[in-house]
Image: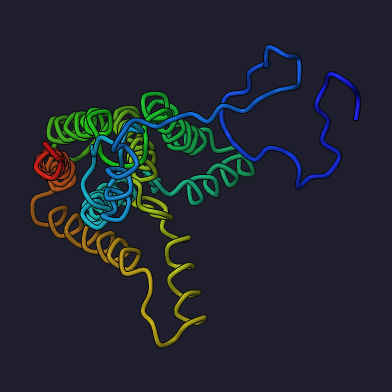
Amino acid sequence: MARGRASFTHKDERPRSVGLAVRSQGGLGNVRVPRRAPAGAFDVEDRARRAGRGTDGRGIVHAPSTRAAASLLVALAAASGCIDVICLTKLNGYFASVVTGNLVHFGHAIATADTRSLAGAVVAVGGYAVGVAGATVPLRHTPPGWNRRTAVVTSVEAVLLLGFTVGWVACSARPGYGFGLVLLAMAAVSSGIQSVITVAAGVRGASTTYLTGSLTELVRRRVVDPHRFADVGGAGRLAGLVVGAVLGTLVLRTAPTWASVPAAVLVVAVIAFAIGLTQRARTAAGRSQPR
């Protein structure tokens, strides 16, 4: 051991405290000074974590329970199914959210030199990417769960769907090629936004737009453990997508001008319920705080 300086030669002799490293006045190496968390912060965060709620890192509950968020995602999946039916049947066979199918269209258009089909594929895939990027920017530093920023971003999706509805009504559900691309772009951007909202909702592995992975995980878990029906939320989102597609098809056949209204109403309802659940969670957390 060198004179005047501390040296540790065995891993068990190293200091184990975690915190801020400072230089001691005697030059005997670094000393670890543990950081101290605010009083009560860990208790609140632990209670919130057990209840399936998120916090902002300071022990402040800001989101409804994970179970409640999962229910909201079922409604978003239904909205996705509804809008995709319109895009698939009335906008040249493209999807608003299923990028895999749109990429197949893209490849086919390249091989056949079909410029009109190529333009549609570019709009669908590009619009989705724009929606993902636009929603990621405001949500990238927020903790998982529904909060004010999530509500604002979801409101943008609702505005796009309302704009889609206005355009759909204006053209009497018979858009031409050019205006159809505009509507497809709005639907694709809204789907990209919804995908980011779903990821940010705090429900592990959830999706409301691309559900191939959800079906894969549902079947895989069932095979691995036949005696336990796991991933009920995944099954709910799959069912929600199908119900939304059925609803969109029925409205499209009976009142085609209003076909996109259910999707917009579902997203607006999700915003309203999410805000209400968040306020209820904050009120409950405030009552549980010691005075």
Q: 139 or 92: nearer the eye?
A: 139
Q: Is 19 on the left or on the right of 275, as rendered?
A: right
> Residue 93 appears at what percent x and percent y?
39, 48
Q: Residue at x 89, y 21 (%)?
A: 3
> Residue 108 appears at what percent x and percent y?
58, 47
Q: Quadrant of residue 29?
A: top right
User: Is residue 18 visible in the rendered structure shown here?
Assistant: yes
Q: Residue furthest bottom?
A: 227
Q: Residue furthest top?
A: 25
User: Is residue 180 visible in the rendered structure shown here?
Assistant: no
Q: Residue at x 22, y 33 (%)?
A: 151
**Quadrant in which the C terminus appears:** top left
**Marker count (numbered):** 0
Q: Establish if 224 lies above or below 273.
A: below
Q: 136 or 148: nearer the eye?
A: 148
> Residue 240 appears at what percent x and percent y?
25, 61
What colouring does the structure picture have?
rainbow
> Residue 32 appears at what percent x and percent y?
62, 28
Q: Is 21 on the left or on the right of 245, as rendered?
A: right
Q: Quadrant of residue 114?
A: top right
Q: Residue at x 38, y 82 (%)?
A: 228
**Quadrant in which the N terminus appears:** top right
Q: Establish if 70 lies above or below 83.
A: below
